[in-house]
Image: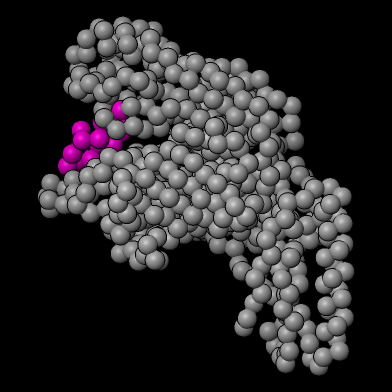
């Protein structure tokens, strides 16, 4: 069956929406009346349930709750000024390195992002195999961390000016849609993964499905820095407005926690200095409801410790844990830059041992700085792993300053094709039930499958992402998220 191309998304507000809606409706009604004159003519597609009306916004059958997810970098490009996104760590996972945003552009329904990729090197001493591991634009949900879902993308990978996309041997990814966790807040892989190996390129690009984190491998190479270009076809479903920014100066972290390979250094620092975890009061502009934190990478990797080469990645950059300090104490860990609700937080799993679901709180007070053992600007020294660091290096680590910028945003829905779903975060006492994953059913045509038709009228899908009035933010049973069909959480409803 032929289909008409979908119309380009139109961004309008207020009375413009209403006038355009009326005008388009009249045009479509005229076409429908004209169709009556032809035998057995019908409309196989006009609107889908809930579209264009703003009346239906419920969770799909079988989905009673989901975990919260951050607003992906793809949904911010074209709305947030580039100067506030540039350099942000949009992906971080131990064992797979980081991805830092370089630049992006939104042209119609096409988003193009260029990013710097910092892979990790793995070696198998038993087989002699070695390779590079790297991620993508979806952020995996590790332990008690938030994930972030990215739409499908076409990726091209470069080593300098050389296209090496064809070197990708395979990847694993956490599928999007509406999955529930298969592990609790102690699990490195909290969600089920799908393995794709070998990969097949489409032209010169690798097509990556919508995902909440992917993990790729390249055979027989040890890359330290690559460039990735992602091309994403996606229509905006939210409008994001910059409301203001704040810049904070912070220092390295000294205190409890897993120091990994840096335990000898941390022992020296705690013996010489008092504990330190800096927190900063938030001055939230009126109307802001989301934030995006852009912070520098830590220059050493304490947590990538492969059995065959435990120390080969320690001098590579990583992200780090930052949190919101609010009425419920410190929030769960955030380790990458993504859009996060200002008025919805879950308590760190260490503060709620054995909880089935983590306690939720609404009000933020302060931003807790990234928990970096070594500040940006201090180079790796082997004594950080083996011990015996000189006093001058300890003083340099203690005194070096870093800056980070919090970007305050206002997120507004502009699509009626979103599902409102209550939110929970699993704790260390949670275990998966029989139904651990769910993919929403494909919305069916309004035609009965038993009817037959001789003629069809093909109309452009004008109402696909266009509605006169989006559904209201009903706070009953919340906190809640507004989710796209591919599983992205693009807006948030605070608890009453």
**Residue 350 appears left or right of 327:** left
Magenta span of residues: 300-314
Figure label count? 0
- Residue 205 at x, y = what percent? 40, 60
Q: Which one is nearer the viewer's eye here, 481 or 252?
A: 252
Splitting the image into 4 quarters, where does residue 57 fall?
bottom right
Q: Which one is nearer the viewer's eye here, 114 or 322?
A: 114
User: Is residue 296 shown in magenta?
Assistant: no
Q: Quadrant of the N terminus?
A: bottom right
- Name which residue lies at 71% across and 43% down: 412
Check the image and report above or below for 47 versus 55: below
**Residue 21 appears left or right of 198:** right
Q: Quadrant of the C terminus?
A: top right
- Residue 323 at x, y = what percent? 52, 27
- Name which residue lies at 26% across and 23% down: 380
- Residue 461 at x, y = what percent? 71, 68
Q: Which one is nearer the viewer's eye here, 487 or 376?
A: 376
Is residue 348 among what the camera can see?
A: no
Check the image and report above or below for 288 versus 155: above
Colour style of the rendered protein structure? one colour
- Name which residue lies at 30% across and 54% down: 164
Splitting the image into 4 quarters, where does residue 263 fall?
top left
Q: Which one is nearer the viewer's eye here, 446 or 227?
A: 227
- Residue 146 at x, y = what percent? 51, 40
User: Is residue 302 shown in magenta?
Assistant: yes
SS assignment for the magenta stretch, majority: loop
- Name which residue lies at 68% across and 84% down: 449
Is residue 130 among what the camera can see?
A: yes
Give the residue furthest to the front: 161
Check the image and report above or below for 39 versus 398: below
Splitting the image into 4 quarters, where does residue 121 fall?
top left
């Amino acid at each position: 069956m032929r289909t008409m191309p979908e119309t380009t998304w139109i961004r309008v507000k207020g009375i413009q929406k209403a006038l355009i809606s009326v005008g388009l409706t009249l045009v479509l009604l005229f076409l429908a009346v004209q169709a009556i004159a032809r035998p057995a003519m019908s409309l196989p597609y006009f609107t889908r349930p809930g579209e264009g009306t703003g009346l239906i916004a419920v969770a799909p059958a079988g989905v009673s709750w989901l975990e919260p997810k951050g607003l992906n970098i793809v949904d911010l490009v074209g709305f947030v000024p580039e100067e506030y996104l540039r350099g942000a760590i949009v992906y971080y996972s131990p064992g797979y390195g980081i991805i830092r945003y370089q630049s992006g552009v939104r042209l119609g329904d096409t988003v193009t992002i260029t990013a710097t990729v910092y892979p990790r090197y793995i070696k198998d001493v038993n087989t002699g195999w070695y390779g590079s591991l790297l991620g993508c634009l979806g952020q995996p949900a590790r332990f008690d961390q938030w994930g972030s879902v990215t739409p499908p993308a076409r990726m091209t990978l470069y080593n300098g000016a050389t296209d090496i996309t064809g070197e990708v041997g395979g990847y694993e990814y956490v599928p999007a849609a509406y999955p529930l966790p298969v592990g609790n807040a102690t699990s490195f892989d909290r969600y089920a993964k799908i393995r794709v190996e070998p990969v097949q390129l489409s032209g010169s690009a690798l097509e990556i499905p919508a995902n909440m984190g992917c993990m790729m491998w390249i055979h027989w190479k040890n890359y330290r820095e690559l460039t990735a270009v992602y091309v994403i076809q996606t229509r905006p479903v939210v409008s994001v407005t910059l409301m203001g920014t704040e810049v904070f100066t912070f220092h390295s972290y000294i205190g409890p926690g897993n120091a990994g390979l840096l335990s000898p250094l941390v022992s020296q620092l705690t013996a010489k200095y008092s504990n330190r975890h800096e927190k900063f009061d938030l001055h939230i502009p009126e109307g802001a409801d989301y934030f995006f934190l852009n912070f520098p990478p830590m220059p050493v990797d304490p947590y990538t410790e492969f059995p065959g080469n435990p120390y080969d990645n320690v001098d590579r950059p990583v992200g780090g844990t930052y949190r919101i300090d609010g009425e419920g104490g410190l929030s769960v860990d955030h380790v990458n830059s993504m859009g996060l609700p200002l008025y919805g937080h879950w308590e760190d799993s260490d503060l709620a041992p054995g909880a089935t679901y983590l306690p939720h709180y609404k009000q933020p007070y302060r931003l807790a700085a990234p928990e970096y053992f070594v500040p940006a600007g201090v180079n790796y020294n082997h004594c950080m792993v083996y011990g015996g660091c000189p006093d001058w290096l300890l003083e340099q680590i203690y005194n070096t300053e870093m800056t980070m910028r919090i970007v305050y945003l206002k997120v507004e829905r502009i699509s009626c094709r979103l599902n409102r779903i209550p939110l929970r975060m699993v704790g260390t006492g949670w275990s998966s039930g029989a139904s651990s994953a769910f993919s929403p059913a494909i919305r069916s045509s309004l035609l009965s499958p038993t009817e037959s038709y001789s003629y069809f009228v093909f109309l452009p899908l004008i109402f696909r992402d266009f509605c006169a009035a989006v559904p209201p933010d009903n706070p009953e049973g919340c906190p809640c998220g507004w989710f796209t069909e591919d599983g992205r959480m693009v807006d948030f409803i605070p608890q009453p």
